[in-house]
Image (cartoon, grey):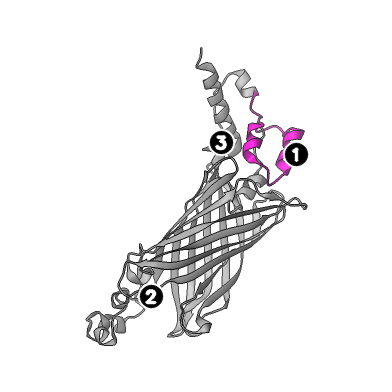
Amino acid sequence: MSKIPAIRRGARTVLVLASLFGVAHADTGTADTLAATPSTDSAPSADCASMQANLNADLKAQMKAGCKPSDAQIAQLMNNPVGNLVMFPLQNDYTRVKGGVVDNYKDMNRTQFIPTFPVALNDDWNLINRISFPIVSDPVNKHIGGLFGDTPLQIAQDPRTASIINDPYSRTTGLGDITYVGLVSPSAGTKLSNGGVLVWGVGGTVMLPTASQAVLGTGKYSAGPSAVLAYMGSKWIGGIFPQQWWSFASSKKNRPNVNMTNIQYFIQRKLDEAGKWHIGMTPNISINWNAQGGGNKVNFPVGLGVNYTTKLAGIPIKYGFEVQYSVIQQSSIPGARWNYRFVILPAVPKFLL
């Protein structure tokens, strides 16, 4: 008899999960267990409807109150850069490069798997963990990587030089440098008078020299600060996510020191009441502080794209496509001109795990 309460609690958990993700389940409990969970087919109560109207509500507390999150609340949570959910984004950037010795456009491709997961430090603070595993395909002969740091005489005598001269843009594909970002963030955002919420996090980032070919990475161990600040409103979402790296050790010979900044800024406008459709941009500004020549340090893109949030096999998932153009470009070295970004982002709210 002592097992009956535990069985009933387990049945309630299964039914709440089913109501959130819209998954049909067979009858798994007694009549009183089913009565404890709101029907997914009936209209929400007045109290539940009031909770669902708050896009930035505490969804864990809302679930405990027996009110499933609305689609708009789930979509808002997926747009929160420090939201309490586990995400598995797959992002592909197809970039057209030009400038310097590159007279005609050359094509680069970067596919990143970026698992992101929060860890509760206590009731008030979370540690947001973000790891990027990049697969890079660049129009650069891989043998160039073997000549980094060589003198002109050594380069002239190296047998690989002939291959480089004959086909300098031979494509090289492989693993790039893996990066980790850890951000400490309040578990609840700061509520504003207009109903929006301000969320933020501060921490650090590390870049590891994991590239499978020298030309696909920096050859350096690098680290630095990172932060995020975002406004989450009922119609607008906007924010900034800067990262800075300085090299402190090397895994390859004679590689130049790293002093780089990457700043992602994002602006999104909700197009429908359910929050499924957004229009906006999410470009990355890149700054190489060690680049020779003042006009070669910064690449600043702007963009326009659309995001759509839905469910696939009961799991919330967001699709996004964006076109970006660099309004500030490197002046005398190759740099990005056009970028086409496609994102698939499945996610699971952390409080369900």
Q: What's the amino acid at mark 1?
A: Ser
Q: Nearer the viewer, residue 71 or 192?
A: 192
- Give coordinates of residue 288: x percent, y percent: 48, 74
Q: Nearer the viewer, residue 143 or 304?
A: 143
Image quarter for residue 141?
Answer: bottom left
Q: Which residue is mark 1?
A: 50
Q: In the drawing, does residue 179 fall left or right of residue 252?
A: right
Q: Which residue is mark 3?
A: 23
How many other residues sit within 10 Å of disc 1, few (<14), some (14-19) or many (≥20)?
A: few
- Give coordinates of residue 115: x percent, y percent: 47, 52
Q: Is residue 39 visible?
A: yes
**Upstream in sequence: badge 3 or badge 2:** 3
Q: Does 17 sit above or below residue 174? A: above
Q: In the drawing, does residue 254 fall left or right of residue 259?
A: left
Q: In the drawing, does residue 210 fall left or right of residue 332?
A: left
Q: Does 241 sit above or below residue 24? A: below
Residue at 52% of width from left, 48% of height from top? 127
Image quarter for residue 21?
Answer: top right
